[in-house]
Image (spheres, rainbow, N blue to C red):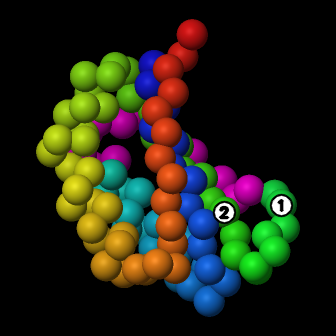
Amino acid sequence: MILYNITINVTSDIEQDFVSWMKSVHIPEVLETGIFHEHKFFRLLHDSDDGSTNYCIQYFTDSIDQMMEYEKKHAALLRAKTQERYKDKAIAFRTLLETI
């Protein structure tokens, strides 16, 4: 199994909108691609010096081939929507993990 993990640092002025938009729009759009069969959405439990909050969205798929299909066909458009909406107020860091 492959875990696609996105950690996003979100400024406090957009935090409520960000959480709402992720739950109602962005995560459903990612799942509609048919690549991922499960997701989890977390808030990291630590204080940030600048008042921002970190969120983590995890998507699960069965193979690296499916993940590469997502990257080729869907990722750029979905990332662009988030970037256009939040600009530099939501900065993402992405990792891929494999079940051992």
Residue at the (29%, 71%) spot, across then down: 81
Residue at image position (75%, 79%) is 50
Q: How many numbered callouts?
A: 2
Q: Secondary structure at mark 2?
A: strand
- Please determine whether, in this image, residue 75 is positioned above or below residue 98: below
Residue 9 at x, y percent in the picture: 60, 66
Q: Amino acid at mark 2?
A: Asn
Q: Residues within 10 Å of mark 1 (few under 14, many from 20)?
A: few
Residue 61 in view here: yes
Q: Residues within 10 Å of mark 2 (few under 14, many from 20)?
A: many
Which of the labelled discs sits on residue 46, or is there none?
1
User: Which mark, by number, is residue 64?
Assistant: none
78 vs 9, left or right, is left
Instruction: Place residue 66 in its image quadrant.
Output: top left
| Numbered range of the magenta stretch | 31-44
Q: Which residue is the site of mark 2? A: 54
Task: Look at the image and tell me in which quarter the C terminus lies.
Answer: top right
What residue appears at the point 57 percent right and 53 percent down from the top-left corner?
A: 7
Q: Residue at x 56, y 85 (%)?
A: 14
Q: Position of residue 4 (x, y in %)?
A: 45, 38
- Specify whether 52 is left or right of 18: right
User: Is 34 included in the stretch rendered in magenta?
Assistant: yes
Viewer-side residue, 11 vs 22? 11
Q: Secondary structure at mark 1?
A: loop
Q: Position of residue 64 (x, y in %)?
A: 32, 22
**Residue situated furthest top in the rendering:** 100
Query: CB of mark 2 within 8 Å of CB of mark 1?
Result: yes
Report whether residue 39 is seen: no
Tag 1: amino acid: His
Quadrant position of the N terminus in the picture: top left
- Residue 20 as seen in the image, left or right of residue 42: left
